[in-house]
Image (spheres, helix red, strand yellow):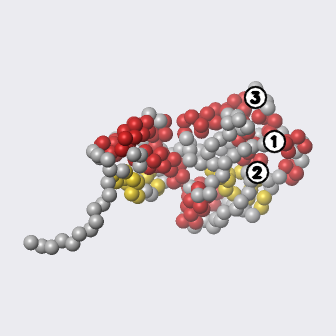
């Protein structure tokens, strides 16, 4: 059984919040830094999915001009990574849940990057390595639809460890033991498997291999669990059987 990666709601603060990244004595700054430590040191997510109050369906209110910010706030810079593949996975999850969704190229609005200025340990010198993917709210203020939006993305919470385990199993035979052992020493393993009895049989299987390379033969995240399967060694070519 896997436990969900934590999900955070971060209050936006007031309209001069960009200054928070400069006011390091502010209590909110210290708390946002703690969240940054959790992301960088404990969680190791494959990506960060963010929802902001400034993007609702086709409506966009992302520019500072719309809110009368001071001119110096236009000079703030927040470097971040995007992704070519993860948005497609998110779109498919939404569509499978009956939610109309499509991809759109756009920058992060200030409802996302402003808090992340303080969440990042050092946005200029050490920005978050994880891609940040922003999704919009619905155009309507329907609570049930927005609750359904998050439920449709529940599988994302268990994907990070699934990817790490997939990479570990696929290691070369001379690295396999070290890679698999290292996985158990990371907090991500214990977040996904608070007790390890469902994971340790995989270690028995990997230890039984000789030089056979492992692979994830199938996986399907479902809510807070995963149906991953792994195989070491290639299947033989099919042969015709003749009865004696």
The mark nearer the N terminus, 3 or 2, is 3
User: Can residue 25 be spotted in the picture?
Assistant: yes
Q: Residue 186 carries which label?
A: none
The mark nearer the N terminus, 3 or 1, is 3
For mark 3, give the secondary structure.
loop
Q: Nearer the viewer, mark 1 or mark 2?
A: 1
The residue at which mark 1 appears reads as 76
Question: Residue 68: image x %, image y %?
Answer: 89, 47
For mark 2, give the secondary structure.
loop
Q: How crowded is mark 1: few (under 14 residues within 10 Å), some or many (20 or more)?
A: few
Q: Distance between the residues labelled 3 and 2?
A: 23 Å
Residue positioned 47% across, 45% down in the render: 164
In-image side of 224 versus 123 (left or right): left
Residue positioned 85% across, 49% down in the render: 64
Look at the picture and state if 193 lies above or below 235: above
Look at the picture and state if 237 lies above or below 2: below
The residue at which mark 2 appears reads as 109
**Label 1 near label 3: C-beta < 8 Å?**
no
Q: How crowded is mark 2: few (under 14 residues within 10 Å), some or many (20 or more)?
A: some
Q: Distance between the residues labelled 1 and 2?
A: 12 Å
Question: Residue 199: image x %, image y %?
Answer: 37, 44
Which image quarter is the C terminus in? bottom left
Question: Residue 156: image x %, image y %?
Answer: 54, 52
Residue positioned 75% across, 47% down in the render: 111
User: Can residue 119 be spotted in the picture?
Assistant: no
Look at the picture and state if 233 lies above or below 37: below
Residue positioned 58% across, 66% down in the render: 95
In-image side of 180 versus 153 (left or right): left
Viewer-proximal residue among 204 and 173: 173
The mark nearer the N terminus, 1 or 2, is 1
The residue at which mark 3 appears reads as 24
Question: Residue 185: image x %, image y %?
Answer: 44, 34
């Amino acid at each position: 059984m896997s436990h969900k990666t934590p999900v955070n709601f971060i209050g936006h603060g007031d309209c001069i919040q960009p200054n928070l990244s400069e006011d390091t004595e502010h209590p909110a700054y210290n708390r946002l830094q703690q969240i940054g430590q959790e992301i960088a040191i404990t969680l190791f997510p494959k990506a960060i999915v963010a929802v902001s109050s400034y993007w609702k369906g086709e409506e966009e209110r992302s520019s500072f001009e719309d809110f009368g910010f001071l001119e110096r706030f236009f000079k703030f810079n927040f470097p971040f990574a995007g992704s070519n593949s993860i948005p497609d996975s998110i779109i498919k999850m939404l569509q499978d849940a009956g939610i109309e969704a499509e991809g759109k190229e756009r920058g992060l609005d200030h409802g996302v990057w402003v808090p992340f200025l303080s969440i990042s340990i050092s946005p200029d010198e050490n920005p978050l390595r994880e891609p940040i993917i922003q999704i919009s709210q619905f155009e309507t203020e329907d609570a049930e639809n927005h609750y359904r939006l998050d439920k449709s993305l529940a599988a994302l919470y268990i994907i990070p460890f699934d990817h790490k385990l997939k990479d570990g199993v696929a290691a070369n035979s001379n690295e396999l033991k070290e890679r698999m052992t290292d996985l158990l020493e990371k907090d991500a393993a214990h977040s996904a498997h608070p007790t390890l009895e469902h994971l340790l049989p995989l270690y028995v299987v990997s230890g039984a291999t000789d030089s056979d390379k492992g692979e994830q033969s199938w996986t399907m995240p479902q809510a807070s669990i995963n149906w991953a399967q792994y195989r070491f060694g290639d299947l033989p070519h099919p042969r015709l059987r003749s009865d004696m």
